[in-house]
Amino acid sequence: MSAIPTLEQLHALGPLQQPTYPDAGAVDAAVARLRTAPPLVFAGECDDLTAKIAAVSRGEAFLLQGGDCAETFAGVTADNVRNKLRVLLQMAVVLTYAASVPVVKLGRLAGQYAKPRSSDFETRPSPDGPVTLPAYRGDAVNGYDFTPESRVPDPQRLVDVYNSSAATLNLVRAFVTGGYADLRQVHTWNTDFVQSSPFGQRYEAMADEIERALTFMKAIGADPDEFHRVDFHSSHEALLLEYEQALTRIDSRTDEPYNVSAHFVWIGERTRQLDGAHIELLSKIKNPIGIKLGPTTTPDDALAYSARLNPDNTPGRLTFITRFGAGKIRDGLPALVEKVTAEGLNVAWVCDPMHGNTFEASSGYKTRRFDDVIEEVQGFFDVHRSLGTWPGGVHVELTGDDVTECVGGGEEIDEAQLANRYESVCDPRLNRVQSLELSFLVAEMLRAAGREGRASGVREQG
Ligand code: PEP
Ligand code: CO
């Protein structure tokens, strides 16, 4: 059995991206509250997800991971959670149906409240000259309002993260098992503004086919449970040590530590120091975990992460989420995949086509081009095809709403339109129509990869 590192041990490793709380007593009180809070997920559910990601690493399934860049407390409403879930269900059904590959559904939600920042401070103009305040680090840390009071880190917010995550997960669990995710609802997921878009119409046609197939299956007496519910898991970046450590518990069944705040947690690009606190904490837990790998990652780094985070080479335990940028993936990714594959390491390769493609529009909005997102996914598929390895999934920032945060896509959102409905408190997300479009494009790539894989036997390689 591994021991859970204490907060003192973790802080001694000099963790990056942690808030400086002004009141140590308030931190202790929040951590004490979290330690007594019931688990949000069960260890057995985490093990189920590990088994599903193992299938991804063997080339037998595809992972769809998506949600907001940063959740907000105000965003915990029934409409918002349902809209996010609905777009993920729609995308998953497109991928499953068009590519005939099982899709592992992983929400970037119910805990995604803390953000690493490139600068500790934010400066904004004012009539009296520029004003500088601590950066917003997500609702888990401080407030988005640009006032000195709101930007002070408040540890009570960690308890609010727990409560908001519990409310979100409760609703998600009700939706996915209580009839909303029933495949016979495949048309209902499409009944609003998205329906009239070209991709909404393409979806309608596909939903008609699925409905006919379901009717046929029912007529011949086949109506399995899988048609009426879906498996859906939660994930977030494990960033704030107070939160993640307080919610790491010894599972009574196995005597092993699990992070019970989410089924899957990942380490971000800015906190993946090999001797750092985040790697130390996640190396001890038994959940399936991910690590973001940006363009500076060397093949030896990748091997070292695997040795540290998955010494037993357990399939499904470790996911490499690459985020190179559209212009870098074709040059940067092959060396990593080659070395990891040559060493016989079991990992799932997932493409985050968002974080390497952010830029500032002339209007000042942080945005991404839809075409760059697609180009990075295409590069990811091409690299894996040329190496005979499996492109295991995509990790995307999206919303179920009609926002204008990323430019391009079928609706041809341009930079001037960004101001119309820009609601993200952090990175720009694909809107509902862009997300659906992405799923159709990825389904085509996946169908081609599946054909090639079957032809060359890639699925046996792992
Ligand atoms: C994120 O996923 O929101 C994020 C900050 O990503 P990365 O760590 O890859 O920069
Ligand atoms: Co982001």
Image (cartoon, grey):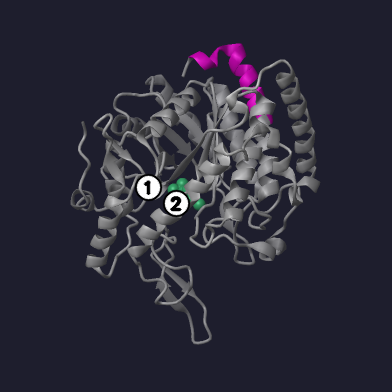
Rendered position, 64 above or below 114: above
The spot of residue 327 in percent (x, y) is: 57, 42
Q: Find the magenta span and give its range.
A: 444-460
Q: In the drawing, does residue 261 fall left or right of residue 326?
A: left
The spot of residue 182 in percent (x, y) is: 64, 34
The spot of residue 151 in percent (x, y) is: 40, 71
Q: In the drawing, does residue 175 fall left or right of residue 157?
A: right
Q: Nearer the viewer, mark 2 or mark 1?
A: 2
Q: Residue at x 32, y 52 (%)?
A: 243
* Magenta stretch holds residue 452: yes
How busy is the neighbourhood of tag 1: few (under 14 within 10 Å), some, or many (20 plus)? many
Of residue 255 and residue 315, the one placed in the foreground of this image is 255
* Magenta stretch holds residue 458: yes
Please state which amino acid type lies under the numbered disc 2: Ser
Q: Which residue is mark 1?
A: 238
Q: Quadrant of the N terminus?
A: top left
Q: Residue at x 53, y 86 (%)?
A: 127
Q: In the drawing, does residue 72 fall left or right of residue 91?
A: left
Q: Residue at x 59, y 26 (%)?
A: 226
Please state which amino acid type lies under the numbered disc 1: Ala
Q: Which residue is mark 2?
A: 165
Query: Is residue 299 something one can see in this rendering?
Result: no
In space, the residues marked 2 and 1 are separated at their CA atoms by 14 Å
Query: Is residue 28 something one can see in this rendering?
Result: yes
Q: From the Cβ of disc 1, is ligand 1 less than 8 Å away?
A: no
| SS under mark 1 | loop
Of residue 225 and residue 2, the one placed in the foreground of this image is 225
Of residue 207 and residue 299, the one placed in the foreground of this image is 207
The spot of residue 166 in percent (x, y) is: 43, 50
How busy is the neighbourhood of tag 2: few (under 14 within 10 Å), some, or many (20 plus)? many
